[in-house]
């Protein structure tokens, strides 16, 4: 089967500033693919390019076997989009939002109406069909936006930071729904800067920084490739003094502000040393995608 | 490459009708107060100025001042209705509510969205103009059947000003921006287009400007039709309005693509 989405040599500049540089992505049909990167890395622009909403300066895009942007309209017929910021229609009720959005896909009202109860059920909004948008909580709006993206029964979903700004309950519910969507055989491409989210949901991720793809693969494999398996985070008084010792015990150490990160394969020597220093506070955990992300993109703030 | 894509003629698909239906559904919820406004506003203006000022002025252009003003006012009301919709309402959907952004994520193009806005602005102006026609007919100043021909003329005025409004919308930085267009262009246009007084009294250089204004051609079409006469040079008036509508829409498409497809 052809990949659901494939880009090659994708480039885009705004006002002389290169926002997307030579991006090559392959998303297999039925997988959940995460596009990770700090703010301004070019994630949203990459999604806009894939949807044919803006023209690339160079490169090729194939989305669901359609050449984009030339045949973007045909491709978008089988695509759903959850944008970064909710743009639900505030003038309409919950059900009207779904009905009106379905019409943009050329669906007849008689085709859309029977889908609405199922979509509301999926979004946990059963019984809210007649509610006004402004009476919904942030989590409910996000779920309605997710339901709206499914109104055309899409093969592929683009989600731009689907859980940003949500509380843990709402986030877990969205995660559970996204798993259900992939189980149904749909392809998901999501952007996020929650590494935990990417690790839980995505079979493969690509890390973007400064418009470039700097790593691509399964989260566990990438972590194993780039990061020592165990991490000990340490902070407390006279950290500097202990750090000299830590450097001899850990494969790699990193000082970020008032915290030392020790990356190790065998954690016992580090923990043994910490037991003799009760004034230091530490956290021992397995390496995760965030460690990888910070190693590859650095700890500097991005605005 | 990008530049040539911006310059392409608008490619219109029947999909734009879904955008029109969205706006219609919103309007339907507020139809009663909206129509009340469409009837009350011109009624207050017409009776105030038409009877009040008319008593002092006597006849104008061979008819009562009320009849003269009524047909001019019909054209300017149409102009303002299309303008408000294509400026303030369209801007809030484009920039504030991000309704356009949601629509183009579906298999819709920006051209579809614009066409929906354009035809919707003309629809709103048709409703507003038609309400004035009802009032004029009710007071007995509309001659039928020719007054019926004013209806397509109203639609044409709406398409012309809807297109111009969308050009301004594409350039707007905020709601305040529209003040320039309304105060510096539309208000003088209303004064120079024969809405309140016949233009033949204007000095020649100003009359030359008047002849280039879309509202003037709208008034010249509508006034005789309501009075029961065939307009002189109807073809020219229709052609000028149609040119404003079509060239204006093309320009609006270029400007909007430049703003949003970047």
Image (spheres, rainbow, N blue to C red):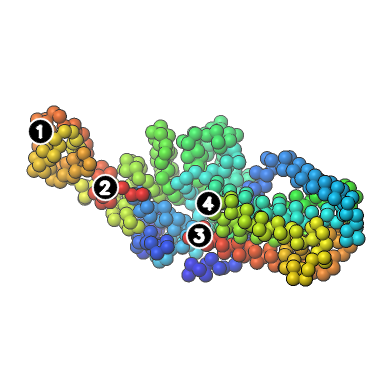
Q: Residues within 10 Å of mark 4 (few under 14, many from 20)?
A: some
Kindly report the distance in space between the C-alpha atoms of the residues bearing marks 1 and 2. 28 Å
- Name the chain under label 1: A
Q: Give the side of residue B83 with respect to residue B230, left or right.
A: left
The image quadrant where one finds the N terminus of chain A is bottom left
Q: Residue at x 35, y 45 (%)?
A: A193
Query: Residue A210, located in which quarter of the rendered image?
Result: bottom left
Q: Residue at coordinates 65% horizontally, 44% vertically from top-left?
A: B26
Residue furthest top in the image = A278
Q: Do pointers 2 and 4 mark residues of a single chain?
A: no
Q: What SS does tag 3 mark?
A: loop
Q: Residues within 10 Å of mark 2 (few under 14, many from 20)?
A: few
Which residue is under mark 2? A299
Pointer 1 residue: A272
Q: Nearer the viewer, residue B94 or A177?
A: B94
Residue A251 image position (x, y, % from top left): 13, 45
Q: Which mark is residue B101?
A: 4
In the image shown, does B158 or B215 lie closer to the viewer?
A: B215
Q: Please state which of the two labelled residues, at mark 2 or mark 4, is closer to the viewer.
A: 2
Q: Are marks 1 and 2 in contact (CB under 8 Å)?
A: no
Q: CA distance from mark 3 to mark 1?
A: 59 Å
The residue that label 3 is drawn on is B261
Q: Is residue A114 left or right of residue A178?
A: right
């Amino acid at each position: 089967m052809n990949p659901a989405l494939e880009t090659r040599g994708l480039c885009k500049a705004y006002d002389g500033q290169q926002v997307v540089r030579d991006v090559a992505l392959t998303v297999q049909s039925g997988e959940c693919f995460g596009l990770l990167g700090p703010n301004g890395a070019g994630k949203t622009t990459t999604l806009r390019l894939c949807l044919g909403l803006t023209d690339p300066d160079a490169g090729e895009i194939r989305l669901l076997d359609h050449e984009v942007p030339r045949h973007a309209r045909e491709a978008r017929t089988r695509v759903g989009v959850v944008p970064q910021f909710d743009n639900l229609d505030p003038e309409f009720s919950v059900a009207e939002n779904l009905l009106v959005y379905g019409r943009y896909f050329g669906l007849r009202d008689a085709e859309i109406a029977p889908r609405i109860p199922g979509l509301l059920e999926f979004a946990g909004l059963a019984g809210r069909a007649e509610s006004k948008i402004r009476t919904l909580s942030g989590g409910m709006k996000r779920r309605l936006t997710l339901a709206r993206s499914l109104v055309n029964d899409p093969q592929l979903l683009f989600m731009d930071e689907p859980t940003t700004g949500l509380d843990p309950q709402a986030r877990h519910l969205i995660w559970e729904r996204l798993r259900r969507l992939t189980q149904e055989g749909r392809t998901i491409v999501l952007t996020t800067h929650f590494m935990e989210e990417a690790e839980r949901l995505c079979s493969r991720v690509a890390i973007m920084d400064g418009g470039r793809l700097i790593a691509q693969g399964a989260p566990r494999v990438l972590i194993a490739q780039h990061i020592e398996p165990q991490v000990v985070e340490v902070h407390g008084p006279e950290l500097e003094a202990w750090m000299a010792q830590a450097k001899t015990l850990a494969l790699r150490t990193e000082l970020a502000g008032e915290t030392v990160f020790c990356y190790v394969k065998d954690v016992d020597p580090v923990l043994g040393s910490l037991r003799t220093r009760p004034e230091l506070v530490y956290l021992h955990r397995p390496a995760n995608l965030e460690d990888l992300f910070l190693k590859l993109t650095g700890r500097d703030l991005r605005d | 490459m990008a530049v040539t894509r911006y310059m392409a003629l608008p490619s219109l698909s029947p999909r734009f009708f879904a955008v029109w239906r969205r706006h219609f559904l919103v309007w339907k919820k507020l139809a009663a107060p909206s129509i009340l406004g469409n009837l009350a506003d011109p009624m207050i203006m017409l009776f105030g100025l038409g009877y009040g000022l008319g008593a002092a002025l006597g006849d104008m252009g061979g008819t009562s001042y009320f009849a003269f003003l009524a047909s001019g006012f019909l054209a300017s009301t149409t102009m303002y209705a299309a303008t408000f919709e294509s400026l303030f309402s369209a801007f809030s959907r484009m920039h504030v509510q991000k309704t356009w952004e949601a629509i183009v994520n579906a298999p819709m193009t920006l051209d579809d969205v614009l066409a929906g806005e354009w035809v919707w602005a003309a629809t709103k102006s048709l409703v507003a103009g038609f309400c004035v026609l009802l009032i004029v007919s009710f007071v007995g100043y509309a001659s039928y059947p020719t007054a019926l021909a004013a209806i397509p003329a109203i639609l044409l005025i709406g398409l012309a000003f809807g297109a111009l409004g969308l050009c301004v919308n594409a350039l707007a930085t905020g709601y305040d921006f529209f003040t320039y267009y309304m105060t510096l262009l539309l208000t003088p246009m209303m004064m120079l287009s024969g809405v309140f007084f016949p233009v033949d009294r204007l000095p020649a250089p100003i009359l030359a400007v008047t002849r280039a204004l879309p509202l003037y051609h709208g008034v010249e079409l509508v006034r005789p039709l309501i009075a029961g006469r065939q307009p002189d040079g109807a073809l020219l008036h229709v052609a000028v309005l149609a040119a404003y509508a079509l060239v204006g829409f093309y320009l609006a498409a270029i400007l909007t693509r430049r703003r949003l497809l970047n």
